[in-house]
């Protein structure tokens, strides 16, 4: 989710965190109140900052989660997903996308544009 969308969709983020807690994830960091904020990555030479929506661990493996909702800025979202995909493959971590009903087509179109093969977590 892009920063603009996070302010409007905190309930979706909270629902996603609750889902991950039920699935056995630990050390959950999320960009919502009551949780530690995940590490941000700043693009060199600009003021663009990338913060994953949720970062959690299970069985010693770090997982990065992105909540996919229809966005006004799909270009920013694509670059964020591309960056997180490359980062997780470099460090042997996992990158997963959480979406909900009404946003499946948007999410699948974005993944197709980026040439990414991901199994969606559907809430």
Image (cartoon, helix red, strand yellow):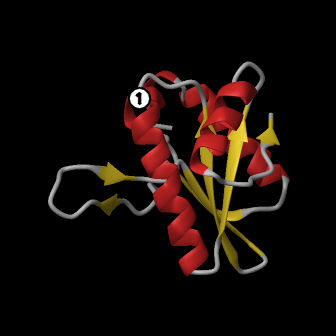
Q: Between residues 73 and 23, which one lies in front from this camera angle? A: 73
Relative horizontal placement of residue 60, taking residue 40 as reference (left or right): right
Q: Which is nearer the eye, 54 or 24? A: 54
Q: Nearer the viewer, residue 89 or 38?
A: 89
Above-or-below relation of 108 to 20: above
Q: Residues within 10 Å of mark 1 (few under 14, many from 20)?
A: few
Question: Picture coordinates of residue 59 (x, y %)?
Answer: 79, 77
Q: Is residue 15 visible?
A: no
* Residue 89 x, y percent position in the rendering: 60, 74
How many numbered marks does the figure carry? 1
Q: Is residue 74 left or right of residue 49?
A: right
Percent from the top left, x then y, of residue 123?
A: 80, 34
Q: Position of residue 11 (x, y in %)?
A: 61, 27
- Tell me what residue is drawn at x 70 percent, y 42 percent: 98
Q: Is residue 58 visible?
A: yes
Asked where in the image residue 102 lies, by quadrant, the reply is: top right
Residue located farthest toward the right when viewing the structure as drawn: 23
Residue displayed at 38% across by 53% down: 50
Residue at the image point whose x is 70% and y is 77% from the top: 61
Residue 103, by quadrant, is top right
Q: What residue would you read off at disc 1?
A: 73
Q: Tag 1's secondary structure?
A: loop
Q: Nearer the viewer, residue 90 or 30?
A: 90
In the displayed structure, 71 sits above or below 24; it is above
Residue that protrudes farthest toward the left in the picture: 45
Q: Residue at x 78, y 23 (%)?
A: 101
User: From the viewer's perspective, is 6 left or right of 69?
Assistant: left
């Amino acid at each position: 989710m892009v920063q603009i969308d996070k302010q409007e969709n905190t309930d979706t983020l909270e629902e996603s965190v609750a889902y991950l807690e039920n699935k056995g994830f630990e050390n959950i960091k999320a960009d919502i109140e009551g949780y530690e904020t995940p590490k941000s990555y700043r693009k060199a030479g600009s003021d663009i900052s990338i913060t994953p929506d949720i970062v959690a661990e299970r069985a010693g493996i770090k997982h990065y989660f992105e909540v996919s909702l229809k966005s006004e800025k799909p270009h920013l979202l694509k670059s964020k997903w591309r960056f997180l995909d490359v980062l997780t493959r470099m460090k042997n971590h996992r990158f997963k996308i959480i979406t909900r009903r009404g946003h499946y087509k948007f999410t699948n179109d974005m993944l197709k544009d980026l040439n990414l093969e991901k199994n969606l977590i559907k809430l």
